[in-house]
């Protein structure tokens, strides 16, 4: 596929056919994704390839607590799990909130499930002393995750970066033997999408750009 087509049509695939994703195709996807950038080129990514049914069921179950809070906050008009505005949703409401199957089913239905991890011993987390949630560490792993999805798209497959189960990281560690210095970054179901979305909803460039400083004029196609 042409690069720009891949970039504009790689969507979050959550429904999959029964087609397998053979190991040689998965290998090919990873073999291209490994050229992603990481801080200092230290390539701290580690990938667990999960096909086992019991493990998938455990992953689906570990998604539920965070998904309940996510949905409860959405229903209350909040931006779920953000670290800036405290939630007004109480624990009882969260506990009673139902989780849509699209949040738990993909790991059960996908041809394969990947756990993307990063070895924190090799990540320069330059925002670690700031008074806000860390985001820089993610930049050493999510380009790799995105490259995986682009390569999967190119091969006729698809998947999603999911992070809800990461809220249960201690249990993921226990389930899969992940050492303490390794963070779970995403759980990625991969398979053949039931349908291919072609038109993704995204903000336009002027909606998120500012010239020279915060609040500046947006960048338009005719700015300069
Ligand atoms: C950091 C990150 C975390 C995400 N976590 C989840 C998740 O836990 N569950 C899920 O179903 N989708 C998750 N997504 C997928 C987003 O919902 C999806 O990329 C977005 O809605 C755009 O979807 P589209 O490409 O199909 O338009 C996540 C995406 C990113 C980048």
Image (tube, grey):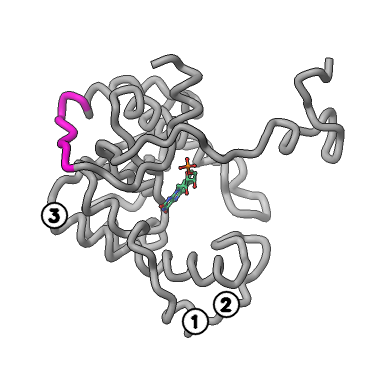
How many angstroms separate mark 1 from mark 3 (CA)?
31 Å
**Residue 46 disc label:** none
Q: Quadrant of residue 217?
A: top right
How many angstroms separate mark 3 from mark 2 (CA)?
34 Å
- Residue 23 is inside the magenta segment: yes
**How many numbered markers are drawn?**
3
Whichever of labels 1 and 3 marks the residue nearer the N terminus, that label is 3
User: In the rendered view, does 150 fall on the left or right side of 218?
Assistant: left
Of residue 137 and residue 200, the one placed in the foreground of this image is 200
Q: Is residue 103 above or below residue 39?
A: below
**Local secondary structure at mark 3:** helix
**Residue 93 disc label:** 1
- Residue 219 is inside the magenta segment: no
Of residue 168 and residue 61, the one placed in the foreground of this image is 61
Q: What's the residue at 31%, 59% (across, down)?
A: 104
**Local secondary structure at mark 2:** loop
Residue 134 in the image: x percent, y percent? 57, 49
- Residue under label 2: 89
Q: What's the residue at 14%, 58% (across, down)?
A: 54
Magenta stretch in the rendered image: 18-25
Q: What's the residue at 84%, 28% (across, down)?
A: 212
Of residue 138 and residue 92, the one placed in the foreground of this image is 92
Residue 203 in the image: x percent, y percent? 65, 39
Tell me if the residue at label 3 has its CB under 8 Å from ligand 1: no
User: In the rendered view, does 6 fall on the left or right side of 135?
Assistant: left
Q: What's the residue at 43%, 70% (across, down)?
A: 68
Q: Is residue 73 above or below residue 134?
A: below
Do labels 1 and 2 touch, CB within 8 Å? yes
**Residue 53 disc label:** 3
Whichever of labels 3 and 2 marks the residue nearer the N terminus, that label is 3
């Amino acid at each position: 596929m042409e690069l720009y087509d891949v970039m504009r049509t790689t969507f979050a695939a959550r429904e999959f056919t029964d087609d397998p994703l053979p190991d040689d195709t998965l290998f090919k996807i990873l073999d291209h994704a490994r050229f992603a950038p990481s801080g200092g080129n230290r390539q701290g990514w580690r990938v667990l390839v999960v096909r086992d049914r019991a493990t998938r069921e455990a992953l689906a179950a570990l998604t539920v607590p965070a998904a309940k809070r996510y949905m409860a906050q959405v229903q209350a008009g909040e931006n779920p799990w953000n670290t800036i505005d405290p939630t007004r949703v109480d624990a009882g409401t969260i506990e009673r909130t139902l989780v849509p199957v699209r949040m738990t089913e993909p790991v059960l239905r996908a041809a394969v499930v990947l756990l993307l991890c990063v070895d924190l011993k090799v990540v320069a987390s330059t925002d670690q002393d700031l008074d806000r949630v860390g985001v820089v560490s993610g930049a050493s792993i999510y380009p790799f995750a995105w490259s995986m999805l682009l390569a999967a798209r190119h091969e006729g497959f698809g998947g999603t970066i999911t992070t809800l189960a990461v809220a249960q990281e201690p249990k993921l560690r226990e389930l899969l033997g992940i050492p303490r210095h390794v963070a779970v970054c995403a759980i990625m179901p991969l398979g053949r999408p039931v349908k291919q979305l072609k038109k993704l909803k995204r903000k336009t460039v002027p909606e998120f750009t500012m010239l020279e400083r915060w609040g500046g004029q947006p960048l338009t196609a005719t700015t300069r």
